[in-house]
């Protein structure tokens, strides 16, 4: 008898079931319970789900089930055309998705290939040329391979746009529309997004047919199982406050390990990681200037606990898959309120409880208000009693001239916001034309200006934290 609380009632092949059992999946997550039957039926899906909810298996398992009748043990590439395409915004997310898919198909003859930018094309070309039914790709690099005729999308039956909001943020819309123009019109389309802007709705309207809406969290809402704290302080107290939190907010009031700390700019990312290292903490930084190898190495160190604190910018951290991440600290309030949702989505994943603490200076109050509006909640703003004087751990950046500081605090983004959706869907594919990375940087966003605010007296101690 199949049990609706486990995976047996979805009609998945025993080869898939045995692979996920080995991975330790016993109970479907809410998005899996909703998405698997719908995708199996061949319907289009608009999924409102963050990374960490189990959405990858939610779309991948039924896709694999649908492709199984085409599985071939033949070595011939012609027997392994691309039948499912999964587009992801970042190398990290693409890597993690492909990693999961490869585990799900491990017992079947299906193949999965992975392509993303910033690394040598040759090994990817070899994988594409030997054939793979499931292709996980970032848009720009996929277009490069298509231009070089390393693969074809003419037999794609199912396409997934994963983290669609982030792909639009990153200016991938032109690339995505070119790719979609190359797909057969008769296909199943799935789109997942953590947030719902007008652009996302337009993309969905253009890309999906009568989509089934699957929601596992409220739109633009933050995970219920994440306790969110906001601490108000002066810019010069930030480093000391961070050190205090790191040494006192671990289990039983001890040291925290595996903490992801978000900052808004690359330069801060490097600087803060250095300051933490000086304070005896195993810290590393990941930001847009780091190579793929460096990012992967830092991530690996973080996952295996050799790195206690990973300081990251939004772009670099996108798609990080660390299942049991207990704490996320927003060292800076994000410029864009939607980034807050993505940032805290790194904790409280797959039903685990999480804690997120955001440090807020006076000049960041408006950005916090924007987050409250977006997430429809009111933060209780707390203050933090520092046991070490702030000046002993002075933030390097507070010692810098304000102008230089403002220049260096530009967001870690080398792209502009995506242009309107409609324009791109009507355009034909132009081989080799990839606009990502060629656009001018975005206009300066409002951010805190160093040296403009008066110090805030820190009085009470953080308390009353739900754990
Ligand atoms: P995702 O949101 O797809 O990135 O998944 C987040 C993490 O949860 C991944 O590490 C998955 O391997 C894991 N996961 C997904 N589904 C389940 C499940 N049903 N049971 C346990 N872990 C899961």
Image: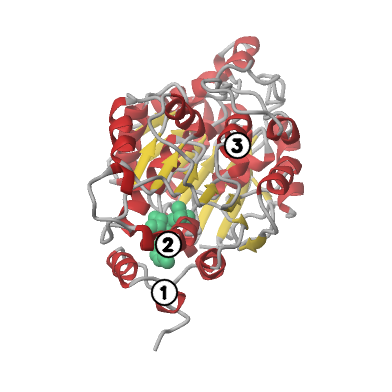
Left of 8 or right of it: where is 301? left
Residue that carries the numbered disc 3 in the rendered image: 181
- Residue 239: percent from the left, percent from the top? 50, 31
- Residue 406: percent from the left, percent from the top? 64, 16
CA distance for labels 2 and 1:
10 Å
Looking at the rendering, the quadrant in which ligand 1 lies is: bottom left
Ligand 1 within 8 angstroms of badge 1 C-beta? yes
* Residue at image location 60% in from the left, 28% down from the top: 429
Q: Say if 208 sits above or below 273 in the image.
A: below
- Residue 169: percent from the left, percent from the top? 63, 34
Residue mark closest to the camera, 2 vs 3: 3
Residue that carries the numbered disc 1 in the rendered image: 7
Task: Check disc 3 and report its element: helix, strand or loop.
Answer: helix
Left of 104 or right of it: where is 189? right
Q: Residues within 10 Å of mark 3 (few under 14, many from 20)?
A: some
* Residue at image location 50% in from the left, 23% down from the top: 266
Circles 3, 1 touching at the beta carbon (< 8 Å): no
Q: Which quadrant holds residue 385?
A: top right
Residue that carries the numbered disc 2 in the rendered image: 61
CA distance for labels 2 and 3:
26 Å
Q: Earlier in the sequence, mark 2 or mark 3?
A: 2
In this rendering, does residue 213 appear at all?
yes
Q: Residues within 10 Å of mark 1 (few under 14, many from 20)?
A: many
């Amino acid at each position: 008898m199949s049990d609706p609380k486990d995976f047996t009632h979805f009609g998945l092949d025993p080869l898939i079931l045995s692979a996920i059992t080995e991975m330790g999946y016993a109970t479907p997550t809410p998005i899996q319970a909703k998405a698997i039957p719908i995708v199996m039926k061949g319907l289009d899906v608009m999924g409102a789900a963050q990374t960490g909810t189990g959405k990858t298996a939610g779309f991948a398992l039924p896709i694999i089930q649908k492709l199984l009748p085409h599985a071939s043990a033949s070595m011939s590439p012609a027997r392994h055309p691309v039948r499912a395409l999964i587009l992801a915004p970042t190398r990290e997310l693409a890597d993690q998705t492909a990693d999961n898919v490869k585990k799900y198909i491990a017992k079947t003859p299906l193949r999965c290939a992975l392509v993303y930018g910033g690394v040598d094309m040759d090994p990817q070309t070899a994988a594409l040329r030997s054939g793979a039914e499931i292709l996980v790709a970032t848009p720009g690099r996929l277009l490069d391979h298509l231009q070089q005729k390393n693969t074809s999308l003419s037999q794609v039956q199912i396409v997934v746009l994963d983290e669609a909001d982030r792909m639009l943020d990153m200016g991938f819309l032109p690339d995505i529309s070119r790719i979609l123009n190359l797909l057969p019109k008769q296909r199943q389309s799935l789109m997942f997004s953590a947030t719902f802007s007008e652009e996302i709705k337009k993309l969905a309207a253009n890309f999906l047919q009568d989509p089934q809406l699957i929601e596992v969290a409220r739109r633009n809402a933050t995970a219920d199982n994440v306790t969110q704290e906001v601490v108000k302080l002066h810019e010069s107290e930030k480093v000391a406050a961070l050190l205090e939190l790191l040494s006192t907010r671990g289990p039983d009031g001890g040291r925290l390990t595996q903490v992801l700390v978000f900052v808004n700019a690359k330069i801060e990312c490097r600087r803060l990681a250095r300051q933490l290292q000086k304070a005896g903490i195993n810290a590393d930084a990941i930001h847009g200037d780091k190579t793929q190898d460096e990012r992967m190495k830092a991530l690996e160190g973080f996952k295996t606990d050799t790195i206690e604190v990973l300081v990251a910018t939004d772009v670099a951290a996108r798609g990080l898959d660390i299942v049991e991440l207990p704490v996320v600290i927003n060292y800076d309030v994000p410029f864009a309120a939607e980034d807050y949702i993505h940032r805290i989505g790194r904790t409280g994943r797959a039903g685990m409880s999480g804690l997120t603490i955001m440090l807020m200076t006076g000049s960041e109050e408006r950005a916090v208000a924007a987050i409250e509006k977006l997430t429809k909640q009111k933060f209780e703003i707390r203050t933090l009693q520092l046991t070490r004087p702030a000046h002993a751990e002075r933030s390097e950046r507070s010692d810098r001239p304000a102008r230089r500081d403002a220049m260096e605090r530009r967001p870690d983004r080398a792209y502009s916001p995506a242009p309107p959706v409609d324009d791109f869907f009507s355009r034909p594919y132009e081989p080799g034309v990839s606009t990502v990375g060629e656009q001018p940087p975005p206009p300066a966003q409002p951010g805190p200006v160093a040296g403009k605010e008066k110090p805030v007296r820190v009085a009470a101690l953080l308390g009353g934290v739900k754990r």
